[in-house]
Amino acid sequence: MSKSAPVLTAPQFALTAASVFAAVLPHLARMPKMFALVILALLAWRIVQRLRGGAKIPALIKLPLVVLIPVLVIANYGNVFGREPGTALACAMLALKLVETETRRDARAAIAFASFVLMSALLFNSALVFTLMLCAALSLLLATLYELEPRPAATAALVWKKHVLDGLRTGAFALLAAVPLCLCVFVFLPRLGSPLWGAPTDDKTSRSGLGDEMDPTSLQELLIDDSAAFRVSFDGPVPERAQRYWRGPVLTRFDGKVWTRSRFLADARRGDAVESIGDVVDYEITLEPSDRRWLLALDVPLAAPENAVRGADMTLVSDKPVDQLLRYRARSTLRYRLDAQLGARERERNLTLPPGFDPRARALASQWRRDLGDDEAIARAPLELFQKDFFYTLAPPDLGRDSVDDFLFETRRGFCQHFASAYTFLMRASGIPARVVTGYQGGYFNTFGNYLVVRQSDAHAWAEIWLNGRGWVRVDPTGAVSPQRVQLGAQAAAGASAQWYHSDWLVGLRNQFDLVNRGWNSLVVQFNELRQQSLLTPFGIAKAEYYDLIGVLIGTSTILLALYSWWVLRRPREAGDALDAAYMRLCRKLARSGAARAAHEGPRTYARRVGAIADSPVPVQQLLEHYVSLRYAHALAPSAAVREFVTAVRALRLPRSFAKVNVLGQAATR
Amino acid sequence: MLAAAERRLPALTRLKQPETLPIRLHRHRIYVLPTRFGLMFSAVLLVMLMGALNYNNNPALLLTCLLGAACYQSVFQAFRCINGVQLASLQGEPCHAGEPLYVNVTFHADGRPRRSLRMRVADHETVFDIAGGDGRVRTSVPAPQRGWRRLGRIRLYSEYPFGLFQVWSWLNPEFAALVYPRLEIAAPPLPHADDAAAEVATKRSGDEFGMLRDYHPSDPRRSIAWKASARHDTLLVKEFEQRRGQDVALEWAATTGLVYEARISRLAAWIGAAEAAQLRYVLRLPDETVGPGLGPDHRHACMRALALLPGAAA
């Protein structure tokens, strides 16, 4: 092995290292920081070591590393199976492979492994831009394979930059040329109805999205995250922005700092929970994967979509975590009466406050109860308070132990969750059942695509209070402080505290561009077994089975490969003019009949030899002689004569094997 | 039938029949198989495919398909790399038995440059490119015996562009190089060398060349008439006037007592010595007499006569 394994040259190693790095890079952001650092350190160490002309890494160093990596993975993730730990392990092993890469064989194995690692990055993020970037990274991998091909010693010393560029060009060309075949396979390769092996669902999630608890900072990161949360297309007119409250988890338990959900109760009642007294809206939601179980719906949903249930608090909960793009239809009413009657236990639950917290807020609430008495007046009181000297900001000061007191009487700055939390607290303290609802508010309507995109930054929290005779009523205390929050969105409401990259025109541009993402989602990401089965409907096959698909796949790819082959095998144009072309044609005809012209034979000698064959058809010899006179007797053959010659050659029919005898004769003399 | 098969698919019969130059590679004689790395890579692609399908992840599947298709279509690029390549000429360098025979091979291809072509002749592998129409390769084969040395089959192959597929073709050109006899090491001095050398010493100063002639690759560099060549398009060589005086006779009969091959080696060494001393010599073999003469052409004629004496390689 060592004999046929020359050590990699510097450019070869550099490209291999670049490929490995490109494969690992998309994973790093997702990994625990310590683990990512270990991988980066491994790569950097090896590259520096190699740059300094370092020798092979001895097994004494490699072996402990091989043991250490799985241990690190287990320490970080708990096991080595599943998507997250599996890819982390693969990344680390790839980095290790680079450490031991010395020969061409190693480098090739590293590239093959790198393409696997690159692919696995898409299991976590399927955005269009991300996919395109990874596809572009493939050309780097191919360029590395190109670089690994042996080169003549004379040119090896030439500028390697040019060769690397050549490789990148060849790789990019290969990818472009592969597009038709790739699409054909992608469309027709039968999808699996159910996975071959279980995809573990207990992965620690790293996706951003609404959590099932709310502390004073939990929404903060979300509000500056511009990725899409879901997209909606409405059957009818789009509701006003101020009406677009997307209901998410409802939080009823408060421990002084954190709002959490109480135990989930399915909505067991029959239809009497919600009484619709206004417009009913039908719409379809495409929810981005969140790894959580709730589904968003316009406040309030009238029924649960498929594979989901509606809770007593009107939250929609899916049967399993949403780990893929999910599309569902829903129907909501914008004006409603919810829970006209409130059970004693339910009432109790929505009045409970942690003892020993926030005395000043309690005092304020009981003062309101004494002074105002009326529930509705009490419900308005905090809003008036908020309007006076509270500020909306995305960067509020920290709060202490008595977070509600601190917010109400000290800092007076915050965003939706502070207001919702304080409002709910005050309501409960004054004896009105109240709860916090989290979800999204607003969304951008894309007029080109005629759909609404709701981003993570549209996350919102508001309050619901129960009033006798009216049921649960939505109160958005944030709107009292900053009406723009409801009218324009969180970024606009934050005003000066917004970053430059949230400037209006950029946000507008991004919202327009979201159309492309939506197209990508519906065309590619959501292309599943069901849609594949309906592919062949125009051709009369209502439901394409896997064997139909495989048949079509084989058929279309054969046609494509035939096209590729034709492109490669097509003959270059015959050299020379029409006269020579006709002569070559005559020679080919004769060759088929067994009297091939030898490479050294001129037309004259050839004519003589063909003429000598016993039963040679006369026109053959004449034609050959005619060619000689046309070619050599004139400076330029008269075109009429040439055309005549061409037709004569075309018309010539030769018996299949008139020259057989001659061939045998030749063989004998040889 | 075999003849028909060979005409149709020349590489299938591995070309027992030598062909005349130029030999052009075309689709009937180019073969393709995946390399070991190609097989390994397709296994990795299969794993990627299963992963993407299992997680029902279309972007991952798209990436896998793209990479797979790019790898697969590289077979066409590989084929294009070798298709249309012509073996234009072969040229053996002068060589004595026992030394490696160097052969300069010229390939020719129109149009696009061809990269990373590899040629294997008798376990000797050379990598070369064809850029700007021509590609020249110098390869060597062992030449243990005097006489005609055939080059044998040439395997021209390439794993361009990504090393996933190997395209190859066999070439069996009608070519043989003449291998001169082995030179005797530490041969005795030329017969009558003393008289002749003395004579030359006086004659040397009066050397005057009589004429110029075209350069042959075998001419020694020192005989090139540089000034005269500069005035013409071609290289010219000074042809010296034949000197008078006694010729050195290299007699077959003078080597009696030695083994057959050793006699040939002795004569060959003497030819070299006579050339080095710039002495006219005549070679007398049992069946023929070469010369008298001096210079590369004469040397070649003598060496050739020696090389082809009975017992030479066919």
Image (cartoon, coloured by chain):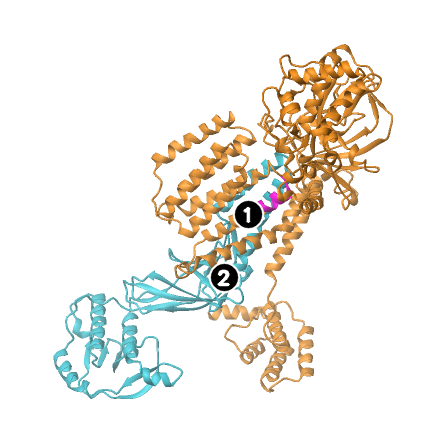
What letter labels the chain drawn in cyan?
A: B
Residue A623: image x %, image y %? 63, 79
Q: Is residue B185 magenta?
A: no
User: What amino acid is found at the position of numbered circle 2 in the picture?
Assistant: Arg
Which residue is found at the position 78% from the left and 43% from the top?
A450
Q: Magenta residues: mostly which secondary structure?
A: helix
Look at mark 1 in the image and give the residue it sits on.
A138
Q: Chain A rendered in what hue?
A: orange
| Image position of B62 (left or right of A232) | left
Give the crowd class for mark 2: few <14, some 14-19, many >=20 residues within 10 Å: many
Span highlighted in magenta in the image = A126-134
Residue B26: image x %, image y %? 54, 62
Q: Which mark is residue B114?
A: 2
Q: Residue furthest right?
A: A277
Q: Count numbered badges in the picture.
A: 2
- Of all chains, the one bearing label 2 is B
- Residue B246 visible in the shown view: yes
Q: Which mark is residue A579?
A: none
